[in-house]
Amino acid sequence: MAKLLTCAFCGKNEKQVARLLGGAQANICDDCVRSCVHILEQSPTKPSLGEDAVLESLAACDAAVDAARNVLQQRVEILRDRKISWDRIGKALGVSRQSAWERFS
Ligand SMILES: [Zn+2]
């Protein structure tokens, strides 16, 4: 039986969560992404959020960025597999064909 993928943050496996996003180094589940978004929405300049809380949030934020970047890369690869042009991908991202190619190819 194949080993189940797990969220690097809460430890739940892919059958226990609604979505599990794959990052370059780790996976993260939808609940943990929501927690990260919640953390990110709190401005670190707010006096109520101490430096320890901000520091503790960094690893989760970094992993969320990694996971989102990985999803974006996978979607571009799906489009390229379907022979969608770099021009169309660039337009969808609001960048030039050249920029899209340099970033994702
Ligand atoms: Zn999780």
Image: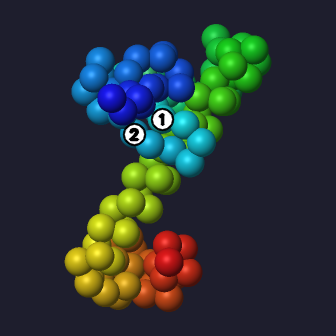
**How busy is the neighbourhood of tag 2: few (under 14 within 10 Å), some, or many (20 plus)?**
many
Q: Identify the residue at horizontal 51%, vertical 44% (top origin).
A: 23
The quarter holding residue 53 reads top right
Q: Who comes first in sequence, dot 2 or dot 1?
A: 2
Left or right position of 39 against 46: left
The one nearer the camera, 46 or 23, is 23
> What coloring was used for the rendering?
rainbow
Q: Identify the residue at horizontal 55%, vertical 81% (top origin).
A: 102
Query: Dot 2 lies on which element?
Result: strand
Image quarter in which the N terminus is found? top left
Q: Identify the residue at horizontal 36%, vertical 68% (top origin).
A: 76
Q: CA distance from mark 2 to mark 1?
A: 5 Å
Under 8 Å from ligand 1: the CB of mark 1?
no
Q: Which residue is mark 2?
A: 21
The amino acid pointed to by label 2 is: Leu
Q: Is residue 6 above or below residue 76?
A: above
Q: Are marks 2 and 1 in contact (CB under 8 Å)?
A: yes
Q: Is residue 93 visible?
A: yes
**How busy is the neighbourhood of tag 1: few (under 14 within 10 Å), some, or many (20 plus)?**
many
Under 8 Å from ligand 1: the CB of mark 2?
no
Query: Dot 1 lies on which element?
Result: strand
Q: Quadrant of ligand 1?
A: top left
Q: Which residue is mark 1?
A: 27
